[in-house]
Amino acid sequence: MTEQQSIPIQSPAACQTCPAHNAGNLLRLGVDMTEFDYVVALAGNPNTGKSTVFNALTGLRQHTGNWPGKTVQRAEGAFSFGGSKYKLVDLPGTYSLLSTSLDEEVARDFILFGQPDVTIIVVDATRLERNLNLALQVLEITDRAVICLNLIDEARRHGLTVDERRLARDLGVPVVPTAARSGEGLPDLLQAIDDVATGRFVCKPHRIRTQSRSISDAINRLAQQVEQQFPNLPNPRWVALRLLDGDQRIVEAVRKGELGDLTRPEMMEMA
Amino acid sequence: MATLALEPNGIKQDRVAALLDSAETLRWQIGQEFHEQLMEDIYTDAARIADRAVTRPDEKPRFDLDRTIDHIVTSRLWGFPLMILLFTVVFWITITGANYPSQFLSYILIDTIQPFLWNIANAIGLPWWLSGILIDGMYLATAWVVSVMLPPMAIFFPLFTLLEDFGYLPRVAFNLDNIFRKSGAHGKQSLSMMMGFGCNAAGVVATRVIDSPRERLVAIITNNFALCNGRWPTQILLATIFIGALFPVYLAGIVSALAVVAVAMLGIFLTFAVSWGLSRTVLKGEVSTFSLELPPYRPPRVLQTIYTSLIDRTLYVLWRAIVFAMPAGAVIWLIANVTIGGTSLAEYFITVLNPIGIIFGLNGIILLAYVVAIPANEIVIPTILMLTVLVYGGSGAGAGVMFELDSQLATRAILDAGGWTLLTAVCVMLFSLIHNPCSTTIYTTYKETGSRKWTAVAALLPLVMGFAVTFIVAQIWRLFSG
Amino acid sequence: MSDSFLTLLGAILIAGVIVLVMWPGKGLWARWQRSRQLTKRVLAEDALKHIHQGDLDGRHATVASLAGALQISMDAAAELLAQLQTDGMVEMHGGDIALTPQGRDTALHIVRAHRLWERHLADETGYDAAEWHARAESAEHALTPEEIDQLAARLGNPTHDPHGDPIPGARGTFIAHDSVPLPALAVDTPGRIVHVEDEPDVVYAQLVAEGLHPGQPVRVVEVTPQRVRFWANGDEHVLAPMLAANISVVPLAVPDETVHADGTLADLALGAAAEVVGISRSCRGSERRRFLDLGIVPGTVVSAELRSPGGEPTAYNIRGALIALRREQAERINVNFQKLAVDSK
């Protein structure tokens, strides 16, 4: 006991600046974090210029391969900003994270179990409504996200204006307009990533509202129970949602205690 | 401290069970419509947020470039002709463009470096069998695959990627989907099929764009019927020296070209026929869904595409040459040069295989060549020439070494000496189209499907079909030619 | 010449024999497999299922009904019953056949296996609706309790099979609904289909062809001794009362507006727009989820933009993206047409 007392125990609140990622799970997902400070996931719908953003951020410091045990292609790259070394992982382009396709499973598992320090959600500024579907789902899983409002040049050409500050307020996360092809907005994007990764910006992400009273009641009741069981879990509401949808992967995660591993690492050290 | 109440993995099992139980109870209460209600809510939410953030122009722009292009490339009048024109151009650039680098690589790798390696081997006094297996076997097969395969791949795939980046390829799938639908396949199979004309292994990987399990398996299994880059030279050579030669000189070129096109067309026909059969029999139980997004057109990033495509393809070809062709080279050299009682292993095999080959309009040499050259179709003809010279004698680079001749007349002379007839040539052309995929493709199929069963189907189905087709052709031919 | 002829003839003969033996479903191999499955155990399990169903329907099973259901002779049926009695599965009360608790458990296990397997076929495979029942009939005997539980877990512990029948829980819990046959639903009362009887096959195939599936809202317009006229799946249907009685419905307190739709997306002219009312119940599993992911939810405005020169598919503007759907798929999306062509976003 005396030895333990001499070790300063960090409370979750005190560790806003610690990396949030789960190195053990990341390694299982095929991402080695030695030599890196933060890991950033890149999510988005297909055809939103996601790979252009990826290339623009990493340049030639990238390599491609498959996800472990899956025939889904993965690109991995690196960049430095503000003295920190970032690893960038490109997730498969999907419309949603609620179905059962292999691509969606890969993307979902990475955000849920890998707990990336930041998830960049690339959305197409010309098709905002469609793209927000995925963005809202991602924001249910992680509260560390940056919206990259890409193809803003194309939107301008179509005469569309997007009020990114309004969007940022509604979504509760930073929104950065970019045109990755010409490099417009990339410095801002890097800054926003850094702000979220280091905890300078604390996101308060939007939660999906349901119109059905019985469903929202069920979600709230179950989310409370999840929270009791797994305190400090960043996404009890989302876990409740998935349990209500009968998602076997999440049922397993609850049963085997994988979810317990996702609470802040300091808690585990204490135990 | 807090550990006392926890079980080994840190969770309280009874409370976990209680949590799952209450989830189950709530599920019964909220009913089966939960998922749909949720999706509807998310979209309503998304629409509301988007609506508040986006200001649209008052007037709809009069000119929408994307839709204008779409109306042309998918029109009844222009859709198909444009498509045919575009792909003719792509193939033409590939074939003519690959010719020179191919000859150049062959000159460097086979005519220059190989003798040079021999000189070194002789100078340092390596035993003949060691330098034989290393230089005439392993090095030669590797060099052959690289020089035949690399240039077309390095040209074809970047062009294809550019069309893809631009957004045209999904429109091709859109235009052709109805034909594929009728045979139980997905329109995007047209794309993996076209990739297959370059390389079947790449075609199998390209089926990833098909997100419906049944249609993807159909596309993987039938990809082999797209005549790949390694088999075009075989078709062209045999069509020229056997079929074209039957006609007067001024017709010979066009007739042999038509013969090759006919074989490729037969391949396309078989793709549809086999797709139709598979989706109604063995693949009936696999899930089938269709979705095809037509993304907005975007100007392709030319330099980057060419750069990454070139690097990717070069690495891929080298990997394939080393992993698959190199051991095959060693095996080919060994069977030709290891002798028992003065007779080479190859001759023993050929004697056994000959009667079987005859039934199918082929011969023992051809069968043996197809067995040892499974890793790469590119080396089938060189192996056949080598084995023919080995058994029947004649001019060649030397007994037991793969070779090809610049002179078509000389090639014909060797094959004639080996007992080839017009029937043999036709059967080899058919068998070259319809036989098991090369081992790279089989390996890729296994990686992509993760299933031994479907890999076996993909490998054996064309083989059985190939034997059936050549058998029928050979027997009917003999029936009528007496 | 005769050599080739003989070889060809021989090959044709061999091919013929192979086809005869291996032909899926009808070949000798398939027949042999089937006959092997018709063991005593299968017969016993089918008998228990039959008696259980009789109990549920309130008409008790007899030796004659058993013989009829299993397509065996009266003698064989009597022998089977005697065997079941010895095994402690059934008891005879006077002339009535009754299940023992053990017999009931076994029957429920078989029912659970059957309905879960149908759910699996509907959601996870590409088999036609008409094939589910027959496939489940043979699968129900082959699955072990562990396999069934795994299957249930993978499917997300479904509560009902695709015909709307409740799936008994692992511990034999069984929740039945208070349904009435469709002809008994009062005219103009909103209702929802909860069950479509899958036997006999001919009747079921006809109901499937009408596009009727559990979950669809219905409203009866007219009931006469000759016909039942009703709205369902966005369409008006007319069925003979005998057929309609194979559909069970529950009355709803609140009318569901998706009962009416102008038509399906397939009827939408190029350049015109429509509002999605709902996705037909016949569209299930991954296809249904895909549609939802693409944003095909009630209220979405969809416009038809391009048609393939091959005739289909047609590309629709769905929430800003151009998505091509085949005719068969578009027919499963019920829509209300919009009067004015709305500017697509």
Image (cartoon, coloured by chain):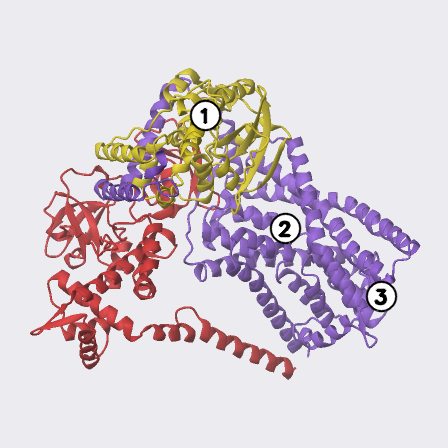
Chain colours: A yellow, B purple, C red
Q: Is residue B54 visible?
A: no
CB atoms of marks 2 and 1 within 8 Å: no
Q: Position of residue C144 (x, y in %)?
A: 33, 62
User: Which residue ends up furthest to the right in the rendered image?
Assistant: B123
Viewer-nearest residue: A73 or B69: A73
Tag 1 and tag 3 share a subunit: no
Quick one: which residue is furthest to the bottom in this view?
C2
* Above or below B168: residue B387: below
Residue at the limit of the structure toward the front, as seen here = A2
The nearer-to-camera label among 1 and 3 is: 1
Return the mark for residue A104: none
Q: Secondary structure at mark 1?
A: helix
Is residue B173 visible in this depiction of the protein?
A: yes
- Drawn side of residue B34 relative to residue C222, left or right: right
Q: Tag on residue B399?
A: 3
Q: CA distance from mark 2 to mark 1?
A: 69 Å
Which label's residue is closer to the chain start, 2 or 3?
Answer: 2
Question: Badge 3: few (under 14), some or many (20 or more) residues near its Cα, within 10 Å?
Answer: some
In the image, residue B327 lies at what x, y percent? 72, 58
Residue C126: percent from left, percent from top = 39, 54
Task: Name which residue lies at 19% across and 76% down.
Answer: C86
Cα distance, mark 2 to mark 3? 33 Å
- Percent of width and height locating residue B248: 78, 61
Three-letter code for the amino acid on which mark 1 is drawn: Ser
Mark number displayed over residue B197: 2
Residue A3: name its quadrant: top left
Residues at discs 2 and 1 both on one chain: no
Of all chains, the one bearing label 3 is B
Q: Which residue in the structure is indicated by mark 1?
A: A6
- Mark 2 nearby-residue class (10 Å; few <14, some 14–19, many ≥20): many
